[in-house]
Each structure stands twice: as C-alpha cells, then as structure tokens.
Image (cartoon, coloured by chain):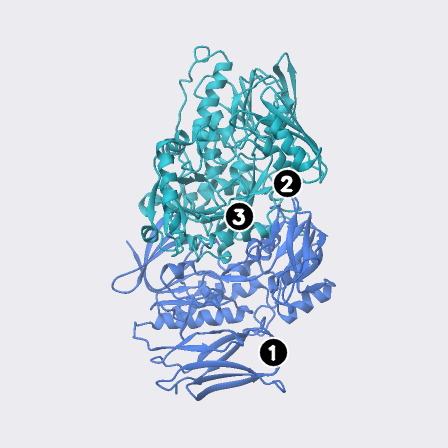
Amino acid sequence: MREQYDVTVIGGGPAGLAAAIAADAAGARVLLIEREARLGGILKQCIHDGFGLVRFKEKLSGPEYAERFIDQFRAAGIDAMTLTFVTAIEKLPDGGFCLTAVSRDGVTAIESKTLILATGCRERTAKQVAIHGTRPAGVFTAGTAQHLTNLRGVLPTKKCVILGSGDIGLIMARRLTLEGAEVLGVYEAKPTPSGLTRNLHQCLHDFNIPLYLSHTVTRVFGADRLTAVEIAKVDDAMRPIPGTESVVECDGLILSVGLIPENELAESLGVALDPRTKGPVCDGSLMTSCPGVFSCGNALHVNDLVDYVSESGEQAGRAAAAFCGAARDLAPIEIGKELLYLVPQQIDRNADNATVTFYFRSREPMGKSRLRLQCGDAVLFEKTYPFLRPPEMERLTVDLRDLPADGALTAQLTSMEGGA
Amino acid sequence: MKLSKLQKKLRAAYGGKYAVTQADGVRTVTGESADWAEIVAVCAMAADRKRGLHVVNDVRFTGAEIAPMRLPALRDRALDGRTPDVLIIGGGISGASIARELTRRQLDVLLVEKESDLAIQASGRNDGEVHPGIDLGRGSLKHHYIIRGNRMFDRVCGELEVPFKRCGQYVCFEQAALKPVIRAYVWKRRHIDGIDDSVVISGKELLRREPQFNPSFKFAIYNPMAGCVCPYGLTIAYGENAVQNGAQISLNTAVTGMTVEDGRITAVETTRGTLRPKVVINAAGVFAEEVARMAGDRFYSIHPRRGTNSILDKKAGGLLSSIASIKKLEVNSGHTKGGGLLNTVHGNILAGPDAVETWEKENYATDRSSIETVFTKQKGTAPALTERDIITYFTGVRAANFEEDFVIEPGRKTKNLIHCACIQSPGLTTAPAVAEDVAAMAVQLLGGPDAVPENPAFDPHRKGVPTLRDLPPAERAAYIEKNPDYGEIVCRCEEVSKGEILDALNAPLCVPTVDGVKRRVRPGMGRCQGGFCSPLVMQIIAAHQGIPLSDVTKKGGGSVLTCGETKGGGGNA
C-alpha cells in the first residue's frame, strides 16, 4: 500500500526540519525523509558555537541548534524515515508525486501532494579547482576533515595547508589547531576573504594563523601520503602567475573552495535552476518552476547563517501546506550585474505577497550602496547599506501587495560612493 | 632500414653521439644524452619491424636521475619456498587474464603484483576502449590479436559479469575533399587488413546519431565493433575468477632478482620470499624490461608514454553515446590517435588521452597542459564539451617499445620464461586472446597439453557484485529482503549500498582500502568524489577488518588517511 502525504520533505537538516515543523503546524500530513541515520544534517558535525544568534539570540553549537528543532519535530509526532534514500521521483498524471525510497526495510513507494527539497549542498573538490599532481592520501574537503575530526574522533592531518577562506575552512583551521595540528596558513585565490568577518577574527587572528590572499594551491606532491603542496600567486583573473611558485611541506591539504547546492532530484523533475545560485528558480513562496515542488535552505542557495536556512524552510513548509494548485502569474526579476544573486528570482502576481523575504549577495565588496526594486519605473522598495561584502548574505522583507499588474521587475544595486 | 644506412643517417644527424650494433635480431643503441626526446627519436629510427628487429636502448640518459622502481613497504617471508608451476609477474590485464586462462588446467599458478591492488598502473589508467582495430596494418602482433580479442568481449564479459557495451566509434572529418581517400582506406581495411566492420557515413547521418557533434563534420568512419569496458573492473574480475579457480594472487609483492642457471630461471627473489617456479611469465608492464634483464633475456626496451584522461559529471553524459574523435589533417606527433571522447559503461564522458614521452615509469602526476591539449582538440568533436564538467582526471603510463608492437613469445635465451611485454594500446582489447596463447605457451613449456591435465573444477563464471542502482524496484527489494545492508545507501552520488561494499570486501580478492572498494563498487566515483562517503567507507572497512579507523589507508602502504585519534579519542558516530 502506498503512503499518502500532503507534504514530503527530503532532507532532515535544519531546512528540512523547519519545513516539516511549519507544514505540520499548518495542518498538513507531513513525512520527512533523511538519508542518514540521525536528523540534523551537517549541524551534527558543527560542534563550534555561533549558531542561532539571529533566531534565538543565543550562541549555540550546531548540535544544540539542531536539537531544538529535533525536539519540536518529535513533540509534533511528525512521520520520519531515516537511513532512507530517495532514488526516484515521478510526477503523477493527476497532480502530486510518487517517490521511490530505499532503506533497510526495502523499496517503498510514497505518494505526496507536494515536495520540499531540503537536500543541502556539497563541497567543491580538488579536481574541480584544477589542482594537479599526484593522488596521495591527505587531501580532504573541509567538511570531510570536520566529519573525521568531530564525528569519528580521528585527526586527518598533523601539519596542513588550507585552501580557501570559506567559513568551514576557517572553522577547521581553528579546530585542527585546537587538536594539536599545525595549520601553516590559509590560502585564498580571491583578493578578499570568502568567510564571515567574525570567523576571520575568531578562527585565524586569535590563533596567529596567516591568511594569504591572491594565492592558490596548484599542485600536490607525494605518492602515498601528501608530502607537500605547490603554492602560486594568482592574477586578477585568479590564474596562477608563472614564476611565483613555492613549495610548502605538509601532510594535509584542506579545501574550502565553495559549496554547490545539491539539486539532482530537482533536475530529475525538470525544475529550472538559476545558474547564479545553482539552486532552483523560485517564487516568493519558494515554489520552484515545477508546481508543488518547493526548495529551501542550502539547496536553494548557499546561506551564510543557519538561522536563514531555518527561515526559508519554514517559508517553504507553510507554502507547501497551503498549496492548492492555483494558477501562477510569474514575473521574473531581472537583476543588475552588481548583484551576485537574488532569491527568490520571480514573483507570482496572483499570490498575496504581503511579506516577501529576499536574500541577496553583492558580486564584489562595496561601500555605501543602494538596493532598489522596481516594477517598470515605479520604485517598490529601496534600502541603503553602509557596506556590502559577498560572504555576508543580506536579507530583507518587502510588502509587495501593491505590485502593479504589468511592468518588468528589476533589482539594481548601485554604489553611492562619491564620484562614481 | 639497413644497418649501414641507419648508421650513416645517425652520423649525419647527431655526429658520433650514438652508435648502433646489431646481433641476434636486436639493434643495440649506445651513447649518452641529456635529451630524452632525442634518445626516443634515435631508438625509434633504429626499429625495423619488417626485418623483425628489436631495439635495446643502452644510451645513458644524463638529463635526470631515473627513479628506481617503487617497492612495497611490506616485507615478510610469506611466499618463501613456494614452487609454483607458473609464476606470473604483474597484475595488470595481461597477468590477470593469463592467470585465469591457466586455471583451466591443473596447475599451481601464482601471480605477484607489487602494488596493493590489480590494475594499478597502465591497466587501470586508460580509457577502457575495446578497439575495432583502426589504423593497424597486417604484420604486427597488435593486428594479429585485435579482431580475435575484440570478438571475445561479449563472451568474456558475460562470464565474468563485467559491464561491456559495444557502442561503436566515429572518426570524424571536416574536409569533404578527403572522402574518396578515406573510402579507399576503408576498402583496404576491409579487403586487405581483414577488419571488415568499418563503413563511411555522411555528416548528416553522423549528426542524426550524435546531435551534439560539430555541425561542420562532412563524413565519418563508423566502426560498429568498437566498445568499452571498465578496464580495472575487467582486470579485477579476471583476477577474482582466477582465485576462485585455485590461483593465488599475492599483492604488495615485488620481484627483486632472479637466479638463472644454464638458461633457466631457478629462483626468483621477491619482497615476500624466494620462489622456485617452473615457468615464469613476464607481464610486468613498464617494468617488463627490468624483469627481462633479471632473467638474462633482454631484447627490447620500453620508452614510457604518459597519457591523461578526464572524467566528466554524468550530467554531461548526453554529449555522446559512443566513442568519437575529430581527425585532424596534421600528422600525429605521438603514437596515439590523439585522444577522443568516450561514454563509459558507467555513463560518464571520458576525454583523452594525450601522449607525452617520458623517462618516468611511475610518475602519475597530472598537468594542466594535458587537460588543455585534449579539451582544445575535442571541442572540435563536440563543441559543448567544457572543462567545467570535469570531476576528476588521472594519468597512465603506457609500456611502449620502439618497435611499437607487442612482444609475446617464449624467452630467447632463457628457456622457462615467456614474455608478454610491451603491451600498450590496444592491449586491453587483445588481452582475452593473448591470454589464451600465453597460457598455451606455458602449458607447452610444462610438457604440452597431455602432460598438464585439464582442471575439471574450472568455472568460467565469476559472480559479480550486483549493481542495485540498475535493478528494477521489485528485484532491488528482493535483495534488500535477503540482506538489509543492500538498502543502506552509503555513496549518494553513485547510489552504492553498504551491502555492495561488504560484497566487495568479501570477494575472492579482498583489497580493504578506500580505493580498493571504490574501484570495485564505485563509492566516491561521483561528483562529490567521496566527500560525503569516504568516512563511512573507512568505518565499514575498519569494522570488516577489525582494525582501528586510523589504520585504514587510501591505497595501502603509507597512504594512511588519518594521523591517529583526536584528543577526545575515538568517536561514537
């Protein structure tokens, strides 16, 4: 017999938990499917603090933050399948979806009116940033190094170089130092750091770990275990500059070179992806181009803080619970080149739109600048920021109830620095 | 070229730098040079296949120090005193397939491999193409074996439960004017070389079959008998079937010396003890020349040729469904078809390889320039090809000799030796056929078929690990019902279950390393490259072997993945 649900959430990390709780609270029959044995997603291995400052006004560790949602999830009695992997999703002819899920219990078919994809993201690997040389042990993505250190209790390196100043890389610089490993430096190909300012201070400066900007790792050495890496300066286009190479001896290379939203299931459903975010193109309710399919958390776009991940999960959960298949009148928002991305990417003119939450990042660090949302010539919203840094995501809510019935939607970011 | 003419030519080109002598069908080149490319060019000039002459390179290379063969860390006497009927040196596709063919007879077969797994060197580092025999003229051993080998793949891969697809190959041309020449070439292939599958198809037909190809292609040669296989998968399957039929495979075992008395090998020194085999088969790949030297039977030299392949995300799999390459007019500098594109049995696009001469037999480091060479050329085959889809890349080193042909024959001076050497492309394709002949040569050396009875227990069928991902839900459910581990997905990208990983560890040839498991059932082969699953695979290996997590290695030897426990000590997850 096939189980029937109103909302099926795929992924039991912070986004999925929040989505399931919100959908359940809105009265929907909810199932959450998680591929790992325990709920919590990547938070399980994030034993550092700093989670929940926005939401709970408290500094929690990752597991503590997750626990708050897991407790709520359990208290609500929401159905969950853990250690269960969704292998296929089929659209049903009369609306809704049929999922095929594999677990130790066998192969289960699940029918659901709506889907929330809370599948998180994966890490970019060494070969995806064109590191050449041998293939020794000792090259890890920061997340894998964190898993080994924090969940398995084994140390991935004793003396390492970290490539990329993304937050996980910075966190691991501190974590490995605390475990007695020597972190020789963090190398960043961009001219500016990729991680949050607070992490630069708390993880590098406080531990005297040097940060080398406009440098990258070009090559690794060692037949069995890593013995050294080659470092080179890079030009403005982040290409290594010949003649600037130097060799640094180490037994570990930890990579924090970017996160990629995981949207293989979304793609199998024909969901349109935004090349900027690598996540689905969504409307204000976080519904994708495929009616009844919602996206949230790091599968939607890579967030800087988990608090916003939970928020987008709740948004998707409420919207999925309320989904009735109404026709949409979708208006895409065209964004200016100063914006790295804007989520959601389109607005359903038929929806209520009383509070639309936007997330954006600037493409480059900017001083005083103004974000302006327009419909045709009419300014819907504008806000001035004292400065913008791409690693720090910005969030704003806008009342779009008075959205004009026609006219192109645009979002522009303009520098207000003198002279420009 | 006659010796006197060759000597004259060498003097004209290089003065007195190089000398060539000729005796017993072998030309020996001597001299000294710091320029490896020049040494290769001189020795290649000395080769004369028409006269059946081999080339031995005794030129002293002063340009760099040639690293000695890497030896395994493991040292014990586990094999000491063994007296196998047949000792096979080398666990590549040649050695593994020969071992399996020999188990058809009642023989004590021992295969030694210095690496921690089979197919670690050339056999595991190629594109897996089962060649149709393009550009092989009559008279070479490559040509002699290619058709027979190619036609055996359906049966062998069926018996060994190895995925194989006969996907066909296109050699594509942009110049319509070449069509008559190519038609004549295809006619020659069919009627003179006996390679009868090729046809010429129009550019329109090509683009109908492969819509992503360069629209300016005017025509193509289509070779329907071309196919592909997972090269290390096939080697491991051959090895497992050999073990299942009674052969012994000793990994981490290097041959370090031999005693030769009265033209016979009487003792073989290895890193795991001294062996006294009746017959020795030299299938040592890039090190076959060193083995021949130890055996007192060196009549060929190997000039290693490196090639790099890239593997693309399965999402790019729509680029082509076959094997293809653009054919450019300029003469290929290296002895290769200049790389191509291939849709593997696993559904990834593979791009490459290039071909670079090198003195380094075990340098598998990749370079940016190799990737650029291949992608620049292959964008001419399929313009949508992009480096952005690369998930990994690897380098292999081919064991080419200067004759550019296989050496498959009994020892010339040493009686109980068989060479299966200088096996470069298309050595994977020819392996099933070569293995039959080499096994027959060994039987002959042991007294002939009458003296060596057949093995009545021989089972040609190897039970592969089921690929649950590919099964319909009902069959998959049946497997999970029998063993719930098949329902626990460990690798999300390739959808590999814990049950499949344990099957790999319980197979006849257990290689309990992260790479060993990866090569057998694919966890870590996908787009995240093991980011998520490698700690889980490590945990499964540790539990299966009863070892601490910190003892698990990537590929054996010193390739430890972790450096002991954290301050808090072993985790509980």
- Which residue matches tag 1? A366
Quadrant location of residue A196?
Answer: bottom right
2 vs 1, front mark:
2
Q: Colour of chain A?
A: blue
Task: Give the structural element (helix, strand or loop) at label 1.
Answer: loop
Q: State which chain disc 2 sits on.
A: B
Which chain, by letter, is cyan?
B
* Tag 1: amino acid: Met
**Which residue extends farthest left?**
A94
Q: Which mark is residue A241?
A: none
**Which residue extends farthest right?**
A208
Task: Give the structural element (helix, strand or loop) at label 3.
Answer: helix
CA gap between label 2 and label 3 equals 46 Å
- Which residue matches tag 2? B37
In this view, B564 is above or below A188: above
Contact (CB < 8 A) between labels 2 and 1?
no
* Tag 2: amino acid: Ala
Q: State which chain disc 1 sits on.
A: A
User: Which class describes the residues within 10 Å of circle 2: few (<14), some (14-19), or many (20+)?
Assistant: few
Confirm whether residue B252 shows in the render.
Answer: no
* Tag 3: amino acid: Leu
Q: In screen coordinates, is A246 left or right of B215?
A: right
Contact (CB < 8 A) between labels 2 and 3?
no
Task: Give the structural element (helix, strand or loop) at label 2.
Answer: helix
In this view, B415 is above or below B399: above
In this view, A184 is above or below B68: below
User: Looking at the picture, do discs 2 and 3 lie on one chain?
Assistant: yes
CA gap between label 2 and label 1 equals 53 Å
- Which residue matches tag 3? B536
User: Which class describes the residues within 10 Å of circle 3: few (<14), some (14-19), or many (20+)?
Assistant: some
Confirm whether residue A172 shows in the render.
Answer: yes
Q: In screen coordinates, is B269 left or right of B197?
A: right
